[in-house]
Image (cartoon, helix red, strand yellow):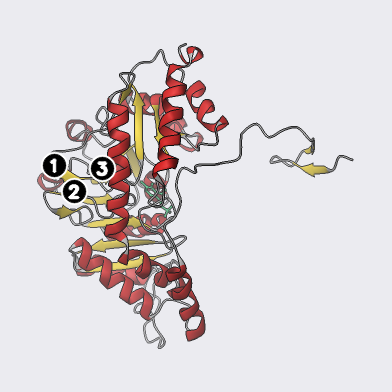
Amino acid sequence: MSRRVFGHAGEKVKKTKAKPAVAPVRIPLTKPYTSEEEERAVIDVLRSGWLMQGEKVAEFERLIADYVGVKHAVAVNSGTSALTLAVRAVGLREGDGVIVPSHSFVATANCAVHWGLKPAFVDIGRLTYNMNPFLVRRALDSNTRAIMVVHQFGFAADIYPIGSIAEKHKLALIEDAACSLGTTYRNRKTGSFGNAACLSFHPRKIITTGEGGMVVTDDDEIANEIRSLRNHGIAPSGRTRKSRCEAAGFNYRMTDIQAAIGITQFKKLEEIIRLRTRLADRYTEEVASCFVLDLPFWPDDSVPNYQSFVVQFADDTINREVFLSHMIRHGIECKPGIQPIHLEPAYEKDHSEADLPETIRAAERSFFLPLYPSMTDEEQEYVIDNLHKALSSKDIRD
Ligand SMILES: Cc1ncc(COP(=O)(O)O)c(C=O)c1O
């Protein structure tokens, strides 16, 4: 007997017994590195009777600030919230221009649009997946007030020239370091370069709190404004409420439950990066021998955290969809790269004419291979074996 259910658009659709189009996932794209330690940390908080923002959040903030090498860390409930508050706290106001890459998750631009700022999309470098500093310079106009630089996939952006441009033109510099906790550039952690930087603890990021984010900064005023804005515009937060609502803020607070997970995850951060790097090195060796694939590259003296393992087809005669469907049919969760923000329906009306050939190239040719700290050598061999099989199949060439 068939059951009638509602589809996405609210229309009635028939549920059939048709086989699923894809095989069950055998190797996921990513998997959080959690264990009984996180479970115990959550239980301890539950038993403490204090579940909202409290001592655990303060402890997590101190750990991250010290690690990144900045004075303040302010925890919030997502990377998107971190970006939204950072944009405001660095002093940007309605109508101000912000230079952003289109090659990023939409949150990078959404956070500016929410405050009435005007994003100006800039292209990335070929195979760096990050903004090209020459194009940043070229995109400046009399309205530009800030640069939002993303360290995409955990690869350091070319932050030194971009930072110089910001300094010379008196622009705010915000780092979207959602993916790059632990990435270093000249022995300095990403997140320590801008007026403010934003981290994400989404499960696809290097460490997770389920959902969560943080703003890190050396600037007392920025930190205080974010502490206030995350708490309805009332600062400070805590058991006693003495302050008034100074600005129409938000409830973007992180809970002690999330922070307890974050503290436990933080203790594993270096181990996570080490495990990811070992797997990434193995993939690199394999991909380097495939002449149809291009590896990413990053500035000299920088060390990635390998939040993702991204690869690009060197040749546009290869059909990426055929490749991906081979992997998916074999239970390997391989995903295409980032879709450009400027071509999303919410942006295309004003930005579809932007000339961003490398962003388009990356969107059309790149893909991610599965990578997570607990991936076994056998699992990785299975992925590599299928990578070679897919590449040698005759229907992969258009
Ligand atoms: C570059 C970048 N910025 C911002 C975000 C938003 O972070 P969150 O999902 O924690 O809101 C993400 C998350 O996917 C991201 O990849």
Q: Quadrant of residue 81?
A: bottom left
Residue 140: x and y in percent read 21, 36
Q: What is the distance, in whole Å, between disc 1 and disc 2 at their CAs?
A: 8 Å
Q: Which residue is mark 2?
A: 171
Q: Amino acid at mark 1?
A: Ile
Q: Earlier in the sequence, mark 2 or mark 3?
A: 3
Ligand 1 closer than 8 Å to label 3 CB: no
> Dot 2: within a 10 Å radius of its alpha carbon, few (fewer than 14), some, or many (20 or more) residues?
some
* Front: mark 2 or 3: 3
Identify the residue at image location x=12%, y=43%: 301
Q: Which residue is mark 1?
A: 165
The label on residue 303 is none
**Position above or below: 51 against 242:** above
Give 18 or 125, whichever is nearer the viewer: 18
70 left or right of 317? left
> Dot 1: within a 10 Å radius of its alpha carbon, few (fewer than 14), some, or many (20 or more) residues?
some
Q: Which residue is mark 3?
A: 155
What kind of element bears circle 3?
A: loop
218 left or right of 80? left
Give the quadrant of the N terminus.
top right
Q: What is the distance, in whole Å, between disc 2 and disc 3 at their CAs?
A: 23 Å
Ligand 1 closer than 8 Å to label 1 CB: no
Residue 345: x and y in percent read 51, 34
Q: Amino acid at mark 2?
A: Leu
**Position above or below: 145 against 390:** below
